[in-house]
Image (cartoon, rainbow, N blue to C red):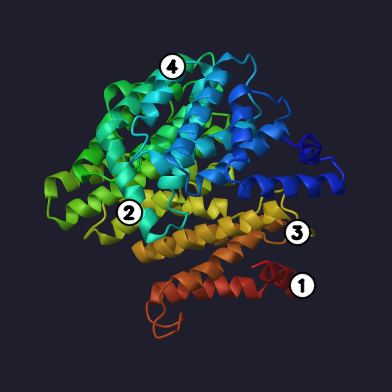
Amino acid sequence: MDEQALLGLNPNADARYRQRAMAYFEQLKESQDAWEVCAEALAKGIYSDDHVKFFCFQVLEHQIKFSLSAVQQQLIRETLMKWLQFQLMNTQPEKAFIRNKAAQVFALTFVMEYLTLWPKFFFDILSLVGLNPHGVDIYLRTLMAIDAEVVDRDILHTPEETRRNTLIKDSMREQCIPSLVESWFQILQTYQQSHPELTCQCLEVVGAYVSWIDLNLIANDRFVNLLLSQMSMEELREEACDCLFEIVNKGMDPVDKTKLVESLCQVLQSAGFFNVEQEEDVDFLAKFSRLVNGMGQSLVLSWTKLAKTGNVKDAAETLQAVEAKVPLLLQLLVHEDDDISANIVGFCYEYLHVLKQLPQLTDQQKANIEAIMLAVMKKLTYDDEYNFENEGEDEAMFVEYRKQLKMLLDRLAQVSPELLLEAVRRVFTNTMQNWQTAPFMEVEVAIRLLYMLGEALPAAHGAHFSGDTAKTSALQDMMRTVSHMTPRFFFKIIYNI
């Protein structure tokens, strides 16, 4: 290889060397066989410079995307496996950016050759790496790179690529998915104490693949119990939460989904995870709130399907399961951390939509509605750290969060306008009795609630002050109170609204 050109790969190299390196890269790409020098360098570990290694993988990546002879394809496979074997013997792993690039090249080779030349791709890799930590790392990175190439819905594919990807997934389901799942279990079990970073990688892989593989391979006592146990391990529990979220989001029969969610909830509750106020790790609680949101929305979807098909018994049991999650929902919704609260808004909104469809509300359901109202009103309040003079990213996030709360308030108005009117009136009256001495944040949210109430409550032909006497009287009383405020204070609040 051109050693002088390789000097230009260093980020600190001057422009002349960088230009020479780029020209050399183009030369290797255009050559029919010059790339084989890069393959040999990787297979034999000739270079220690990280940028040269990365460069060699880039050259291979380019070649794989274009037509290769059978001999060249065989050379690519041998190069990758030799490089992987070399990693097993290294005392130190390669830099992360090199491992990621290697995984991309492995994945690209897999996509091009799995259906034809390399059907034993995974078996060859698994038999080579076993449970070697460095090898397992490359294996897991390769799986995520394959997910990006074959499954990721955010990436646009041509019709031909889509057909190919479907065939790949079908073939994987038939030939190797059970073996892959078993390897994941062994990795999760083996490395949960000694290599938490590998365990987290594996949890990410499980979460990515569960959307299209047979759920029974994952949603069984052996696997789920392992995941639940990792919810109690500080270094693993956030990834375990995300993994369980993906399992819960998997499409399945509504009755089976209810059973799955309920079994998870029973274990989580018995392990103390529902005692939100005792948990101090807000990052974990944000993940846990997202998981609860997923479980709640899954139950609501199951109830909707069962109700539509007239399955009264199972629909009633599922609704009961939904109702049982409301106390936990409220704990998370009212949490002082807005990220934790925001992650549960979806379930809250869907629950209110369920109540809107019921012919009659029970006393408990009315109490739940009122509790949600009070939580929303509390969370609408600016906190002491809000910077009105110089609004930054945190302030912008709170404004977006308030929009979510506004959606809940609108839904509450549809479910029970009378309860909402009374709740807002009570908060408004208590705050505005002493508005001159009350904290600005409390007065602002009281007036904001009145403003939101006017938008949320249905008006009779566009007139809020006609029609229902109780409603018009309450609105008039509150507007009268606002009219007595000093103009300067009033306009300060209106400006913020």
Compared with 59, 182 (above or below) is above
In-image side of 385 versus 132 (left or right):
right
Looking at the image, is mark 3 or mark 1 nearer the viewer?
A: 3
**Badge 4 density bin: few <14, some 14–19, many ≥20, Cα 10 Å:** some
Mark 4, residue position = 130
Q: CA distance from mark 1 to mark 2?
A: 66 Å
Looking at the image, is mark 3 or mark 4 nearer the viewer?
A: 4
Mark 2, residue position = 163
| Residues at circles 3 and 4 in contact by the CB criterion of under 8 Å | no
Q: Is residue 80 visible?
A: yes
| Residues at circles 2 and 4 in contact by the CB criterion of under 8 Å | no
**Badge 3 density bin: few <14, some 14–19, many ≥20, Cα 10 Å:** few
Mark 3 secondary-structure assignment: loop
Residue 12, quarter of the rendered image: top right
Looking at the image, which is closer to me, 445 or 338?
A: 338
Q: Earlier in the sequence, mark 3 or mark 1?
A: 3
Q: Earlier in the sequence, mark 4 or mark 1?
A: 4
Q: CA distance from mark 3 to mark 4?
A: 57 Å
Mark 1, residue position = 488
**Badge 2 density bin: few <14, some 14–19, many ≥20, Cα 10 Å:** few
Mark 4 secondary-structure assignment: loop
Q: Earlier in the sequence, mark 1 or mark 2?
A: 2
Where residue 113 sits in the image (x, y, percent)? 39, 40
Q: CA distance from mark 3 to mark 1?
A: 16 Å
Looking at the image, is mark 1 or mark 2 nearer the viewer?
A: 2
Mark 1 secondary-structure assignment: helix
Residue 388 numbered mark, or none: 3
Q: Earlier in the sequence, mark 2 or mark 4?
A: 4
